[in-house]
Image (tube, rainbow, N blue to C red):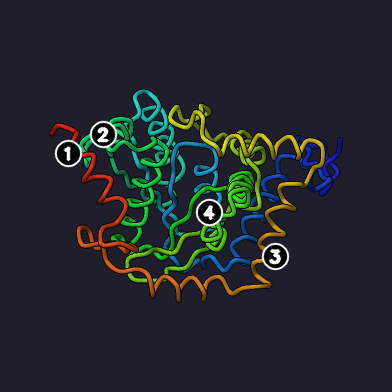
Amino acid sequence: MHCTKCRSKAALKLPRHNAAFCPCCFNEFVQDQVVKAVKTQRMFGHEHRILVAVSGGKDSLALWDILLKLGYKADALYVDLGITGYSDRSHDKVRRFADTVATPLGATLHTHTVEKEEGAGIRELAMAAHRPACSTCGTIKRYHFNRAAVEHDYDVMATGHNLDDEAARLLGNVLHWQEEYLDKQSPSLPASVDGFAKKVKPLYRLTERELAAYCVLNKIDYIVDECPMAQGARTLLYKDVLNRLETESPGTKQSFYWKFLDKQNKTTTPQTDMTTKDRALLHPCTACSQPTTGEICSYCKLMARAKREVPH
């Protein structure tokens, strides 16, 4: 098997592109996909400050690595969830990458420790608030990622969501016909009101397999284990269904999600529409001042319920 680009020995075959690449050309392919994503979705420029949400997994560490190699000013935020064993291992992967790759390039790693700041780990907070663990985790991470981006004056917040993530999310939204979520499923969401950071997903053109290969080829050490709190999550089921379809018909995920984006772009002006809607619906939370549709934001409600149960 020869590299499609340079005709040397290929290391990885990509059926959805009907192509194969050697390590060097594969790295160029990955970077090109991110450059295309940033350009077509108007995510950011080299003059902007970017905050990358890192978890210790392959996607977020690959994203941080790619942005730094492309010359962007990219710092990162790690939220330590206090999951026994798992959080320690994932935090170690993030620190090691920061020390060996990011810091020498002038990047900074910020850390938020849930157990220290919120008074307990995710598992305990979820039990105290009588909420599913994944829901609790999502609420807390979204809150702190946005808060850190705004407070530290970053122009944009980037997450490591890949093509598999976005296709699975789209499938779930379509199956349940969640129109509000479909309206906001975009690789780039604007900073519509004060207190909201612009959010982007530069990896939406790349699959989990491709990002895992990128990490292996570039010697990026990442945590392989699935988060123990994610067991039974519906997203994993949607990913499994899409993987079966992809095996039988390569390019299914790409076609499904990219055609959705094409249709969305042709029929609406998402950023303008969302900005108008957000300005009409959002106002500062009375407890923390971050934007919310209600009097109190979901994070403050969660913490109020949890703190009634969690001893201090």
The label number, if any, that marks residue 262 in the structure image: 3
- Amino acid at circle 1: Arg
Q: Nearer the viewer, residue 92 or 42?
A: 42
Name the residue located 29 percent from the left edge and 56 percent from the top edge. 297
The label number, if any, that marks residue 285 in the structure image: none
Q: Which residue is mark 2?
A: 128
Q: Which residue is mark 1?
A: 308
Q: Is residue 166 above or below residue 46?
A: above
- Amino acid at circle 3: Asp
Q: Which residue is mark 4?
A: 67
- Crowd class of label 2 (few under 14; some 14 to 19; many from 20; radius 10 Å): some
- Crowd class of label 1 (few under 14; some 14 to 19; many from 20; radius 10 Å): few
Name the residue located 75 percent from the left edge and 53 percent from the top edge. 255
Disc 3 secondary structure class: helix
Q: Position of residue 225 (x, y in %)?
A: 51, 26
Mark 4–mark 1 Cα distance, whole angstroms, equals 42 Å
Residues at badges 2 and 1 in contact (C-beta under 8 Å)?
yes
- Amino acid at circle 2: Ala
Q: Quadrant of the C terminus?
A: top left
Sequence order check: which comes first, mark 1 or mark 3? 3
Closer to viewer: mark 2 or mark 3: 2
Closer to viewer: mark 4 or mark 2: 2
Closer to viewer: mark 4 or mark 3: 3
Disc 1 secondary structure class: loop
